[in-house]
Amino acid sequence: MSSAQKITDDIFKMAVNGLRQKTPVVLLACGSFNPITNMHLRMFEIAKDFLEKSGKYIVIQGIISPVNDKYAKQGLLPANHRLAMCNLAVQSSDWIRVDPWESQQDQWLQTVKVMRHHKAKLEEQQHGLMETPSKAKKRKLNTRTRSCSQSSVEDIANENEVEEINSRNNAGYIELKLLCGSDLLESFGTHGLWKDADIREIVGKFGIVCVSRAGTNPQKFVYESDVLSEYENNILIVTEWIQNEISSTRIRRALRRQQSVKYLIPDPVIDYIKKNGLFTNDNDILIRSASKYETSL
């Protein structure tokens, strides 16, 4: 298990104690990752830089969540291949991890349901990491006070409970934000594609970090949407000024034409694709048309 597989005690303590004035954030990217590219990874780094340079946030984890096989998309590789490639791509990262939960479900899940799942897991872990030190301290105090009267021991326990409650109130509340490209933000305005209630929950309850390419205008999408405008303070837009047109669609096309994709996707992913004969004319895993709203995720 890599160091990015979970939020470690040290990272959590740094977030809630040493940097209490900053909000701990976990970035979640949902998508097909068919295949994962260097741009997917760059989006995490760009978003992390932006959030932390604002002085308001500390990014403690990034999560890649490949979509379920039941997602209605032509040419989608089986989840086992996409998961394997994603894991190879992040093996050198100490803060980005791949989560298989979404891909292992019996059916395709809306993005908001995936976010609810990860939020619940974060709250569970946060609760556990805050509980453990307090319980350990109680055990130590109880050992030292075995000779004390029962009332004295109860007083110590009560003091510890108050200390624990105060710690909870002062601790940083971990925020989960959806990491996406401007295409996804634009798709919110497509009639019938998203439920208004889902958009409200994603933007209002969780928040979005949108990494846009230079020349695009995601602010326009926000302005033209009543729902997005209502929660515009929860939409953080980051411009990637370094021109980068890498996309999974272009990668698949290059592979299908037996063109080099070196430096576009991680070398271990290239090796995996070659070893398993993926994205070639010799198999049925082909994308012959791409959705207008397919993001780079």
Image (spheres, helix red, strand yellow):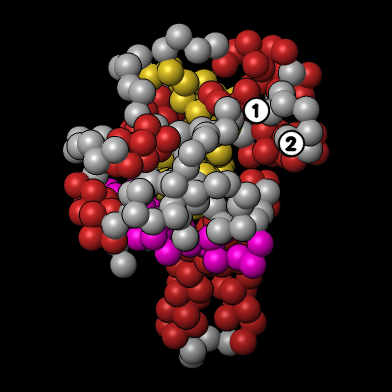
Amino acid at pointer 1? Ser
Q: Residue at x 61, y 52 (%)?
A: 71
Q: Which residue is mark 1?
A: 187
Mark 1 and mark 2 residues within 8 Å of each other at the beta carbon: yes
Amino acid at pointer 2? Trp
Residues drawn in magenta: 79-107
Left/right placement of residue 71 relative to residue 26 reads: right
Q: Residue at x 55, y 66 (%)?
A: 104
In the rendered view, tell whether residue 163 sits above or below residue 206. Answer: below
Marker count (numbered): 2
In the rendered view, tell whether residue 166 sits above or below residue 158. Answer: above
Looking at marks 1 and 2 on the same chain, the residue that comes earlier in the sequence is marked by 1
Residues 50 and 195: in front is 195
Q: Which residue is mark 2?
A: 194
In the rendered view, tell whether residue 100 sits above or below residue 115. Answer: below
Which dot marks residue 155? none
Q: Residue at x 58, y 30 (%)?
A: 293
Residue 8 appears in the figure: no
Residue 280 appears in the figure: yes
Q: Position of residue 226 (x, y in %)?
A: 78, 19
The quarter of the picture where residue 159 lies is: bottom right
Q: Position of residue 53 (x, y in %)?
A: 37, 24
Q: Residue at x 44, y 47 (%)?
A: 286
